[in-house]
Amino acid sequence: MLCAGFQLLYCSVMAGAADLPIRMTSGVRVVSTHLPDPRAVASTASASLLCVVTMPGTNISMMIIILKAPISMLILHQFESSHFNDKVRWALDFKKIPHNRISYLPGPHIPQIRRRSGGPTTTPLLQHADGFVSGSAAIIDWLEAEHPHPALYPEGEASRTLALGVQSHFDSIVGPATRTAVFSVFIHEPGYLCRTFAASKGPLKRLAYRATLPLAMPLIRKGNLVYPDNIARSIDLCRSTLDQLAEDIAATGYLAGNGFSIADLTAASLLAPLANVSHPDMQRPEPIPESLRTFLAQWQPHPAIQWVHQMYARHRSQ
């Protein structure tokens, strides 16, 4: 079985007769099975692998040249349920950019993401043909440069500066606070945490993750700063943010000018965990534990939370 992302440049049966079946995953393409001189091919191609394979118990051998195929589609390395990840998912969907998604489990993701990023262990991580971009703001900046239409950055300098300032504030202050607030409940509902982040995994992987979650819980607690003093600060900050947001959107319904921009996308996505939005990418599995229902209920009447729902309804494709 050849791995996806590689192409089989040359395959020749060197001895014996018959066509030898080759199993390949999606993304693997047979370029040629009959080339006159495989050594010439190998010398002119940037082969990732040149080998001879002999089938056990037969006299059938194959010479194989495999090339690494270019990445033609973006890959988002993500958590399934994460507001920073949904910020990037929203940007990709807004720009109608085809992409694949690979989901990780919190805790075990650390070495996997570090190996790909070369350093950072956080998601989202965007993989493109030339490498990786880490972090939601950097990813969207890359998307704006590579896929400028429709634009998320306002045209005018003043509006753009304002929008990027809103993004920076929510990324550094509000996003971590909403995460801490929600995880202050999640941390006491390990079964539901497992269902939330492992929804797309097979039953065996979900079972294994649930069994090992107590070992990963200290990393999850540390990574989300779920400590008593910080929980209280985070909840207070969420309340003051909602009050300020309600004032800021009163004039136009948007945060930077008269239309939807990176400012609105960032604010709405990073407040989505409090709003409990119904978009498929962020919809929580049912049944929701009573402790989480009670936590979420306190936020719903706020005008800024209603605005979050409106932004998802108007500007986020299903």
Image (tube, rainbow, N blue to C red):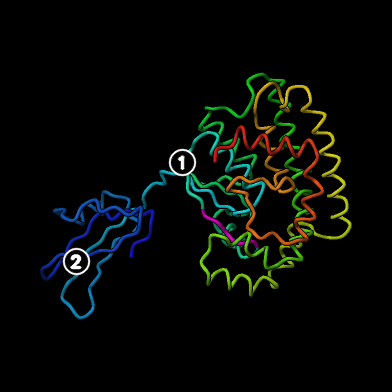
SS at mark 2 in the image: loop
Relative to 19, is 133 on the left or the right?
right
Measured from the top left, where is residue 15 in percent x and y?
A: 13, 69
- What residue did someone put label 1 on? 98
Identified by mark 2, the residue type is Leu
Split into 4 quadrants, where in the image is the N terminus?
A: bottom left
Q: Is residue 184 magenta?
A: no
SS at mark 1 in the image: loop
Question: Considering only vertical position in the picture, is 208 above or below 197?
Answer: below
Secondary structure, magenta segment, majority class: loop
Asked where in the image residue 291 lies, by quadrant, the reply is bottom right
Split into 4 quadrants, where in the image is the C terminus?
A: top right
The numbered disc on residue 190 is none
Measured from the top left, where is residue 11 in percent x and y?
A: 21, 59
Measured from the top left, where is residue 75 in percent x and y?
A: 49, 48
In-front residue for pair 240/118: 240
Q: Nearer the viewer, mark 2 or mark 1?
A: 1
Measured from the top left, where is residue 193 in percent x and y?
A: 67, 63
The part of the chain drawn in magenta is: 102-106
Q: Residue at x 21, y 56 (%)?
A: 39
In-front residue for pair 87/207: 207
- What residue did someone put label 2 on? 20
Identified by mark 1, the residue type is Pro
Asked where in the image residue 199 lies, by quadrant, the reply is bottom right
* Disc 1 residue crowd, few under 14, some 14–19, many 20+, Cα 10 Å: few
